[in-house]
Amino acid sequence: MTNLIIVMGVSGSGKTLVGRHLAQQLGFEFVDGDDLHLPENVQRMKSGIQLDDESRKPWLASICQCVESHFDVGQSVVIACSALKSKYRDLLRTACHPTIFVFLDGPQALIQQRMEKRLGHFMPGALLDSQFVDLENPVGEDNIVPVNIDQPVGSMLAEAFKKTWDELERVVNKS
């Protein structure tokens, strides 16, 4: 059985870190959704222009194609993807059912501090406000694993793994 885990949250919440950790621990492939953005969208974000629903469509389609290509060869995958709106999550769920979403949740001030310290990323901290405006909290949706990011990294990674493992077992046993 192939599985899809999407590590979601606003920019700077730790999606890549947690996603890589989960993939390594579970023996899944890891894909950073940032690598699937169109070059013109990366340039827009670098320039401080937030993406709208229309500009995100090709990116979400690329993520779904990526999932399909992994599943075609029987490979489970963890993808780091903001998945801010419920309609984005619904689209991603069409690639695999059930899809588990690991929601990295934390205070905006903490994430802003982290964004100011990171180097070499195209997403400027100035767009964080727009990310929080777009974020539709997924708690209450099916197969959501909330993880508190306001804790030491080791504790956060342990929490993410334990909760994701428990959810995977629940989903597999339900199937």
Image: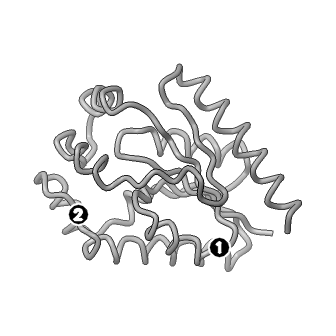
Residue at 75% x, 50% y: name it.
167
Specify the quadrant that holds the C terminus: bottom right
Q: Residues within 10 Å of mark 2 (few under 14, many from 20)?
A: some
Image x and y of residue 68, in percent: 59, 78
> Which residue is denoted by mark 1 in the rendering?
96
Kind of residue indicated by mark 2? Leu
Name the N-terminal-most of marks 1 and 2: 2
Image color mode: one colour
Name, please, the residue furthest toward the front: 140
Direction from residue 89 to residue 75 in the image, left or right:
right
The residues tagged by marks 1 and 2 sit, at their Cα atoms, a distance apart of 25 Å
Quadrant of the image occupied by residue 62: bottom left
Question: In which quadrant will I find the N terminus?
Answer: bottom right
Taking depth in this image into account, of 93 and 45 the one nearest to the observer is: 93
Q: Name the residue at the top extreme.
A: 152
Question: In the rendered image of this protein, does residue 55 appear above or below residue 173?
Answer: below
Q: With 111 as the anchor, is 69 left or right in this view?
A: right
- Give the x, y percent position of residue 121: 28, 44
Viewed as shown, does residue 146 lie left or right of 110?
A: right
Badge 1: how crowded within 10 Å, few (<14), some, or many (20+)? Answer: some
Q: In the structure shown, which secondary structural element does the residue marked by tag 1 occupy?
A: loop
Residue 33 screen position, x and y as percent? 43, 59
Percent x, y of residue 152: 53, 19
Which amino acid, mark 1?
A: Cys
Which labelled disc corresponds to residue 51? 2
Q: Which mark is residue 113?
A: none
Q: Residue at x 70, y 46 (%)?
A: 164
* Most foreground residue, 142 or 158: 142
Instruction: Note whether 143 is above or below 146 in the view shown.
Output: below
Taking the image as shown, residue 125 lies to the left or right of residue 15, namely left
